[in-house]
Image: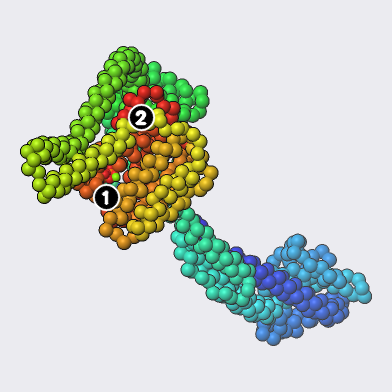
Amino acid sequence: MSLSLRAKFLLSSGLVLALVVSLLIWNSLRLLDNAVSKNADRVAHEYAVTLNLSLSPYASSGRLNDIRSYLQEMLSDPRDSFVRYIAVLDPAGRPLLQVGQPPNQLPALFRTPALRQAEGLSTVQTGRVLHARSPLLLKDNAIGALHFGISTEDLDKARDEVLLQGGAIAAVGFVSGLLLVVAFTAGIGRRLRALSEQARGLVLSHFDLALPARGGDELDVFSHSLQTLTRALQRRMGELDAAEQRLRESEARFRILFDTAPVPLTVTNESGTIVAMNQALTRTFGLTVDEVLGRRSDQFAFWDSAAERERIWGLYQREGVIRGEIAKTRLADGKTGDIAIWTSSLRLDGGPAVVWALMDLTAELEAKRALKELNASLEQRVRERSAALERANADLSAALENLQRAQGELLASEKMASLGALVAGIAHELNTPIGNSLLAATTLSDHVAQFRAQVAQGTLKRSVLDASLADIDMASQLIAGSLNKAAQLIASFKQVAADQTNDQRRRFDLRNVIDDTIATFAPRLRRAQCEVQLDVAAGIELDSYPGSLCQVINNLTTNALAHAFEDRRHGRITISADNLPDGSVALHYADDGIGMTPEVLHRVFDPFFTTKMGRGGTGLGMHIVYNIVTAMLGGRVEVDTTLGRGTCITLTLPRQAPQRRGSPETLVGA
Ligand SMILES: Nc1ncnc2c1ncn2[C@@H]1O[C@H](COP(=O)(O)OP(=O)(O)O)[C@@H](O)[C@H]1O
Ligand SMILES: [Mg+2]
C-alpha cells in the first residue's frame, strides 16, 4: 500500500509526538516514583527514630507489653495513623511485640533486590505499604529489630493525581501538536496538489494553469521554476508545433512530387524490399501496388532476366550508387525495354533506404539506333546521289555548251531581225520624202515636156512662162525640202549605225566635256528659259570616248527641251556625278519636267518609239543613248521618272571604257 506524502508525514509526526509524550510521562513517572519513595523513606526514617526512642527503654527492660495497648490504640483507626503495623523481633528473629497485621514472612520480605537501605534503615514497598526495618538500639547496641509498615496511600494518590494531570496536559499537547501538523500539512498538501496538477497539465499540454505566488518559500521557488519551465515549454511546444506543421507540409509536398513525378520511382530498404512506389511505375511497367510493395524486384516480373537483376544489384553493392546505368526490363506492353537507373541513398524511419529512379529510354535508344541506321543509309544515298549529280553535271555542262552555241546563233539571228526592223524603219521613214521628191520630179518632168512642146509650137505665152516657172520653182523647192528631210534622216541613221571606231579614245575630264556640250545649247536653253545646274566636280578623269559621251548629252538635252519642258514657261536641268565604290562614275541627268507615263518608260529605248510622231520625233534619241552607253562606253542606263515631277537618267560609266573589237558588228547593240 502506498501512502501519500502527507499521510506519511502525519504518521511520522504522530509517532514522534507519541514517543515524546510517552517519554515525558515515563520520565515523570520515574521522577514521581523516586520522589514518592524518597519521601516515604524519609518519613520511615523519622518514624524509626521516634519508635526507637519510644520503644528502646521498654525493650531493654523487657516491658514491651506495657506499650502494646497504646500502640494498638494508635493503630486502631487507619484514618488517624498511616502506620499499618509495628513488630519488634529479637536478634534471633522471634517476635517480641506485634501490633496491627504484619505480613507473615517478615524477615523473608527483605530478601529482595528491590530492597533500599539508608542510614541503617531498610525499606521495601509492596502494594500501598512501605515495609521498614531498623535495628532497635539501646545505647547504640542493637537489642532487636524493629519492623513497621506505613501506608503510602496519600503519596500514591498525590502521585496519581500529578500523573493524571500531567497525562492530560501531555494528551492535550499531543493532540494540538497533531492538529497543528495536520493544519500545516493541509496547506502544503494543497499547494503540492496544485503543483502536481500543473505538472499533469504540462503532460497534457495545458499551459494556462498558473499558480498564485505565496510567501516566497521553497515551494514558491519551485512553483516559480515550474512556471518558468512551463513558459519555456510552451514556447518550445509552439516552435515544435510550427516545425511539425512545416514537416507535415514538406512531407505532403514530397509525397505529391514523388507520386506525380514523371519518372518511375521506388524506395527500398537495405535488403532491397520495396517500401514505396509512384504512379509512373505503374504506367511504365504495368506493376500495381499489391504486386510491388513489400517485395524485392526479383519477386515479380520486372527484370528481363535474373542475370540483369544480379548485375544491377551487384553494381549497387560494389559502388554504393548507380548513375544512369542502362538495364533491360519488362515494360507495360510486355516487351523488353531499356531503362536508365539512378540511385540515391537516404535515411527513412531511422534506417538506411535507397531511392531508385527508373527512366524508360526505350524509345530514345530505338530512335538513336534508327538514326544511326538512317545516317549509314544516308551516307550511302549521298554517295549515290553525288555520283548521279556528277553525271547530271556532266550532262548539264554539255547542255550548257549546246545552249551557248544556240544562244550565239540566236543572238546572230536576233541581230539580223533587229537590223531588219531598222532597215524596215529606215525604208518607211525615207519613203515619204523620197516619194514626195519623186512625185515632184515627175510633175516637174511633165511640166518641162509641156513647156518644151509649147516652145516648139511657138505658142508660149508670157503668162504660161511665168506659171511654169512658178511650178518649177515650187517643185524644186519641194524636191529640195524632201531630199533635205531624207538627208537629215540618213544623218540620224548614220548616228545609229555609225562606225563608232571613228570616235577617238582619249583621257578627258568629265566636267569639261559636259560643260562644252551644254555650251552649244546656250541659245536654245535661253529661249526655253531653262536653267542648267552643273554639279560635277572637276578632276573626274575618264579613259573613254568623249565624242560619244557628247552625243549622249546632246540627245538628253534635246529630249529635255523637246519633251520635258514642252509647254512650260521654264525648267531646270541638274547634272551631277558621284564616284562609286567600284571605281566607276554615276552621272545623273535630271530635269523637273513632265515625266513619263509607265507605258512611255517601258518603251523609251525602243527604236522609232516616239510620242512626237509627225512632229519632229524620230524615236531614235534614247535608242542611240542606250547603244552608245552600253556598247561604246561599257556602262549602264537607268531611267527614274515620276509623272508631273520630272525624269532622272543615270549613266553608270566605267573610268576606263572597254577595248573595242575592230569590226562594226554592234551596229544596233546587243
Ligand atoms: N526628258 C524627257 N521627258 C519626257 N519624255 C521624254 C524625255 N526624253 C524622252 N522622252 C520620251 O521618250 C520618247 C522617245 O525619245 P527619243 O527616243 O529621243 O525619241 P524622240 O525624241 O524622237 O521622240 C519621246 O518621244 C518622249 O515621249
Ligand atoms: Mg529625242
Image coordinates for residue 302, horizontal then vertical, percent: 33, 25
Image coordinates for residue 318, horizontal then vertical, percent: 51, 23
Q: Is mark 1 within 8 Å of ligand 1?
A: yes
* SS for callout 2: loop
Q: Is residue 461 left or right of residue 486?
A: left
Which residue is more in the foreground, 364 or 377?
377
Label 1 environment density (alpha carbons within 10 Å; few <14, some 14–19, many ≥20): many
Q: Is residue 39 left or right of residue 326?
A: right
Residue furthest right in the image: 139
Checking the image for residue 596, the label placed there is: 1
Q: Quadrant of the C terminus?
A: top left
Which residue is more in the foreground, 254 or 518?
518
The residue at 40%/37% (across/down) is 548
Residue 298 seen in render: no
Q: Are marks 2 and 1 in contact (CB under 8 Å)?
A: no
Q: Is residue 409 left or right of residue 20?
A: left
Tell me the residue that label 2 is attached to. Answer: 499
* SS for callout 1: loop
Classify 543 as above or below 640. Answer: above
